[in-house]
Image (cartoon, helix red, strand yellow):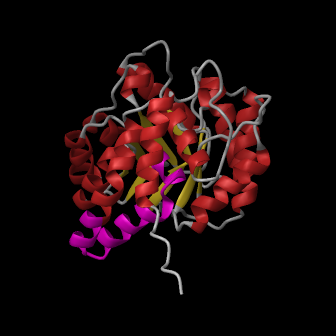
Amino acid sequence: MATQLTGVLTALATPFTPDGAVDVPALRRLVDRSIDGGVDGVVACGSTGEFASLSAGERRLVVETVTQHTAGRVPVVAQTGATSTAEAISNSRHAQECGADVLMVVAPYYDPLSLGETTHYFRAVAEAVELPVMLYNYPSATGVNLDPATVGKLAREVENIRYIKDSSGDMGQATQLIHHHSDYISTIVGWDALILSALTEGAPAVMAGTANILPREIVAVQRAVAAGDFATAKAEWDRIYPLIDAILSSPFVPAVKAALEILGEPIGAPRRPTADLDAASVNRIQTLVNQLQPAPAPAG
């Protein structure tokens, strides 16, 4: 089945039990929370999902759980990139067998590669599978930036490279991708502070870790933009942006997990050595969450 990703995609967090194992029941609930909130797709083993701290077996467990529990309700994107081409191919083939709809492949991380080495890696992974591939550009974590010209060249030359998730945080770069290369590749902006800007610029989709927390609200922004109701989109964005900004201004994964706990959806602590969020940041997020809650109905 051909998949065209649009709208809002949740970069799922990975829940852990108190003893540090992947919490499968909590992961299923988190998937339901996003789908019930109206999102258009879910993403397993992204950066919000702490993929770099998961073992190979845990990564496969997360992808299997998400694909099985989603059961076709929305598309599933599986992040399958690794520090070696062979491991990325193995992860990608496994995700394809599990029923993922799209493979998101991060550039190798830790030891920065040249742009040529990185593009060779993407070609090799894409050619080893049949599913659509999403390049994952996250230069602050990988040390290499996939510039628009390079992305456009890859998309023109490798048939199943169909998406890029741009997490450069550079709206100028995302705008070039959208306007110069959209005939060959769909740009999904993966920087939560740029959600409204990306959508109004014409990005077909956004991917957000904060959609774990605010799925309905972020979807409302996207739907309003899609309907041409920019005033409603801006008003809703102005309402939720302070909480998104507070989460982005904190260590991101601990902040996402703290916000979910505040909302009564606990999914455990970040995997160590990542620490829990500090008390001052928790209190700030608590205040902003409370401000977003609807006022109680009057008595009588």
Lateral position of residue 86 relative to residue 134, left or right: right
Position in image of residue 229 (x %, y %) = 25, 75
Residue at screen point 49% across, 72% down: 296
Q: Which quadrant would the N terminus be assigned to in this image?
A: bottom right
Q: Residue furthest bottom?
A: 300
Residue at screen point 38% across, 40% down: 246
Of residues 110 and 279, the one nearer the viewer is: 279
Number of marks in the image? 0
Position in image of residue 82 (x %, y %) = 59, 26
Q: In which quarter of the image is residue 32?
A: bottom right
State whether the magenta stretch is mostly helix, strand or loop.
helix
61 in magenta:
no
Q: Residue furthest top?
A: 111
Q: Which quadrant would the C terminus be assigned to in this image?
A: bottom right
Residue at screen point 63% across, 53% down: 264
Residue at screen point 74% across, 58% down: 69
Lateral position of residue 230 relative to residue 61, left or right: left
Indicate whether 102 appears above or below 283.
below
Lateral position of residue 213 relative to residue 97, left or right: left
210 in magenta:
yes
Of residues 179 and 159, the one nearer the viewer is: 179
Indicate whether 178 appears above or below 216.
above
Position in image of residue 232 (x %, y %) = 27, 72
Residue 113 visible here: yes
Give the magenta range. 208-235
Of residues 185 and 156, the one nearer the viewer is: 185
Position in image of residue 96 (x %, y %) = 68, 48
Of residues 247 and 143, the one nearer the viewer is: 247
Indicate whether 273 appears above or below 266.
above
Residue 156 visible here: no
